[in-house]
Amino acid sequence: MAVARKIKTLLTVNILVFVGIILFSVYCRLQDRSEGLVQIVRSADGRMRSRHTRVGALVDREAILQRLDHLEEVVYNQLNGLAKPIGLVEGPGGLGQGGMAATLREDSLETESKYEEYGYNAQLSGRISLDRTIPDYRPKKCRQMTHATDLPQISVVFIFVNEALSVILRSVHSVVNRTPSWLLKEVILVDDNSDSVELKASLDQYVNRRYPGLVKIVRNNRREGLIRARLQGWKVATAPVVGFFDAHVEFGMGWAEPALMRIQEDRRRIVLPAIDNIKYDTFEVQQYASAVLEAHRLTLVFVSLLKAKQCIWGIPSPGLSQPPAPPAGRGSGYRTCDLLRAVSAPTRTPAMIGCSFVVDREYFGDIGLLDPGMEVYGGENIELGMRVWQCGGSMEVLPCSRVAHIERSKKPYNNDIDYYAKRNALRAAEVWMDSFKSHVYMAWNIPMTNPGVDFGDVSERLALRQRLKCRSFKWYLENVYPEMRTYNDTLTYGEVRNSKASGYCLDQGAEDDDHAILYPCHGMSSQLVRYSTEGLLQLGPLGSTAFLPDSKCLVDEGRSRTPALKKCEDVARPAQRLWDFTQSGPIVSRDTGRCLEVEMSKDANFGLRLVVQRCSGQKWTIRNWIKHGRH
């Protein structure tokens, strides 16, 4: 025992001596650099006094600031040591401080390979402190608010698969640094079966030593996908409120209190922090223009179900803890101009972006969590939005709660993610959209019968809807999302082919051109044709919200042999946009009696030109029918 005690004493002395040497070395360096800096400042001051032009003064000031930045980085690197064993940086200062753009002095093959692997500059991320500060982009009114002292605690869940270690740990440091300790019960990291070696032992050892008892790691034995990985995090969480986030975020000051307050006021409310952007190449933190535009950006995803970007409506509530109820009647939501008057107010949204949301844990279980029958990710955020609203809850964007998120240039789970998004969209449509589900099939340009996508058994989700006594999708449109365009007058949709041009389909052509063309069939949205009960033939992707242009109408103006594409409301005479069409029959203009046909032309693309001319018996077919018959 005595020998062991002596050895322990010697080790302690050696460590203290070593630390003393390091501190003395840092002090000497600081002294040397400080003296040099004083000389620089004096020299610069003399030069500036001798110059009378503003340009010269700015140049000298910039030189001083650059030297100060360099000095700060040197001191910071000397003092930092907690994360050195895993090659990372902790503490204040350094590259990217304050959310500023950062760069490395030279690119390398390793930098490029990490770009390709992660979809962001992981090499640079490893040089940026895990504790860096970011700008406070909250509206001024948010900073003046006070919150109750009895707010519920929160469990923060991060989902990751093959992320850079530095990005994951910066997410963890950020939430710990900017959440009051009495509110943050735990941080849960869910590893969706990552392949990266550094995300195993290195991650475990670091969080266990740095945040003992606070950070838990859950590891999936197989790749479950983002949706089911979040469910794993929910099962482990023990706080009354759970926040779900991607593992490549940084939290703003005071993000937690306003979100927890809103949920404390109404447990059926799902809160979405406003999202700011972290640039994937420089890690600069950028503010989106306003909370309103952020709310709009969030629901640009709404009809990823409909494969079209969307905007939203919102209800302002200046100075109120509870937004007022929406006025009755379709199209009666408050508009952007109203929201701009209350940028700090919660903004109701029909759906959410998938990277972050905060919810009462028990309520989340009561309404069915996320659909476990969905695969990977895509569509679950839309399904949750429809379900919450239709089943008596609400969803809102909260400008006073802000989280910055890396918009990666490459997504994980890249194996045929488009297929999974389509599959999940069809599941959501079949359960929640009633007769409006046809809009999803139309937008994806696939048939409603035998769509070629197995979306699985939805009987349990239908039973959930019945058990919760949820409202109809029509109610949702009238009260939550009145801007959504509806196409219930559709008779038939899909690819349109001509008997004279095998393998070619009617196509909207270039977006800035006003002429339809024939193009090799590919089934994408530019070849989506919709024929309505009125007799309109519309080409191109659905304009699924009033904020976006609708697909254009095919028009026979009578003066030319070339059919035009125009905004339906801009056609001079309504009859010019109306057509008679039968399956395996002609397409005939009601205004002129001429037929839409194909002729051979050396000057046209693929040697085929669309014309309107005296009918010669050419036949057209369209792929998908909702209602059959002669029209």
Image (spheres, helix red, strand yellow):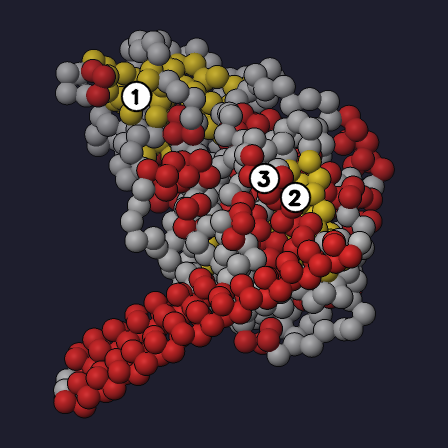
Q: Mark 3 — residue?
A: 199
- The relative height of residue 210 versus residue 121 in the rendered view (above or below) is below
Q: Is residue 541 above or below residue 419?
A: below
Q: Which mark is residue 12?
A: none
Q: Residue 234: x, y in percent? A: 75, 44
Q: CA distance from mark 2 to mark 3?
A: 8 Å
Q: Are marks 1 and 2 in contact (CB under 8 Å)?
A: no
Q: Earlier in the sequence, mark 3 or mark 1?
A: 3
Query: Can residue 386 be seen at all in this image of the molecule?
Result: no
Residue closer to the observer: 604 or 263: 263
Are discs 2 and 3 less than 8 Å apart at CB? no
At 37% from the left edge and 58% from the top edge, which residue is drawn?
102
For badge 2, the amino acid type reads Asp
Dividing the picture into quadrants, the one containing residue 227 is top right
Residue type for callout 1: Leu
Comparing labels 3 and 1, the label whose residue is closer to the camera: 3
Amino acid, disc 3: Leu
- Give the labeled residue for mark 2: 204
